Amino acid sequence: MATVITIDVTFDLICPWCWIGKRHLAQALSQWTQAEPAAPVEVRWHGMQLLPQLPHGGAPYEAFYLNRLGSAQAVQTRQAQVQAAAHGAGLEINFSAMHVMPNTARAHRLLTAVLDKGSSAQHAALMERLFRAHFVEGADIGDAPTLVALAQECAVDAGLAERAMAVRKPVEPPDLPPQAGVPHFVFDRRWSLSGAQPPHVLLSAVRRTHAQPSPQEETR
C-alpha cells in the first residue's frame, strides 16, 4: 500500500491569500496526481481566526481597512496587489461588494461540524462556497442565517448547520511557528511553507516529501 503524503493547511476565510493558496495547492496536486497517480496526498484543513477580536456582527469593511493600512491610497494599492494575484490563480475578488469584515468563528465552527458529521465532499464544497460568498458576493459569512443558507446550497442539513451556529466554544488556534503567516502548509509534519506559494513551489515540496520518507516510514 502506498504511503499517503499529508498536507496540513491552516487558513482563515477572510484572508484572500488563503483562497489564492488553496487554488495554487489544487493546481499543484493536479500536476502531482497526473505524474504520480500511485502516491496519494491527503489535505487536512485547519481553520483559525486572524481577527478573533471582531464583534460577532463584524465591522464596516472600508473603515476597518482604512484604519488598518492608514490611508485610502494604501488600501487601493493593497487591493490591486491582491486582485492581480487572484487573477493569476483564476479567481476574481470584488472588493466593491464587500461591506462587512466578518467574525469567522461561526463559519469555522460550521466547517468543523460538517467535517465531523457530514462528508469530505460537503466540507470541500462549503469551504469554496464560503470563500466565494465573501470575496465575490460580499456576503456576511459571520451571519448565522446566511451561513445556514450557504450550507444548504452545499447539501448540508439545515439542522446540522443550525446546531453548529448555536455552539459558543471559541475556535482554538492551531499551533503555528512564531511569525508564521497564513495560509500555512505543513508537509508530513516535517517541513512547512507560509503564504500563497506558487503552484511550482508547493509541487516541489510534495516531491521532496515523497522522495525523503520520514524515519518512521523507513523502519516499517
Image (tube, rainbow, N blue to C red):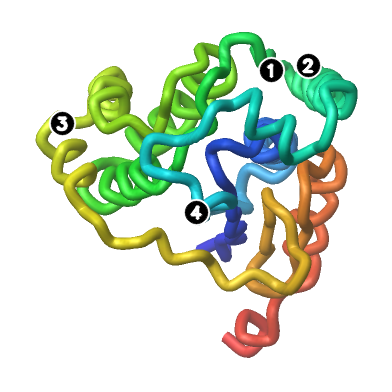
- Residue occupying image coordinates x 84% and y 51%: 204
Q: To which residue does mark 3 refer?
A: 157
Q: Disc 4 or 3, which lies upstream in sequence?
A: 4
Q: Between marks 1 and 3, how big is the CA–CA gap?
A: 28 Å
Which residue occupies 51% across, 12% down?
A: 137
Q: Secondary structure at mark 1?
A: loop
Quick one: label 1 or label 4, which is nearer the N terminus? 4
* Mark 1–mark 3 CB contact (< 8 Å): no
Q: Determine contact: label 1, label 4, CB under 8 Å.
A: no
Residue extending farthest left: 159
Q: Position of residue 40 (x, y in %)?
A: 58, 51
Amino acid marked by disc 3:
Asp
Q: Which residue is mark 4?
A: 52
Task: Report if the CB atoms under discs 2 and 1 are less than 8 Å apart.
Answer: yes
Which quadrant of the figure has residue 208?
Answer: bottom right
Q: Write the residue at 68% across / 63% down.
A: 187
Disc 4 element: loop
Residue positioned most to the bottom = 219
Query: Dot 1: few (<14), some (14–19), or many (≥20) neighbours within 10 Å?
Result: some
The reply, left or right, for residue 200 in relation to residue 215 is right
Cα separation, mark 4 vs mark 3, equals 27 Å
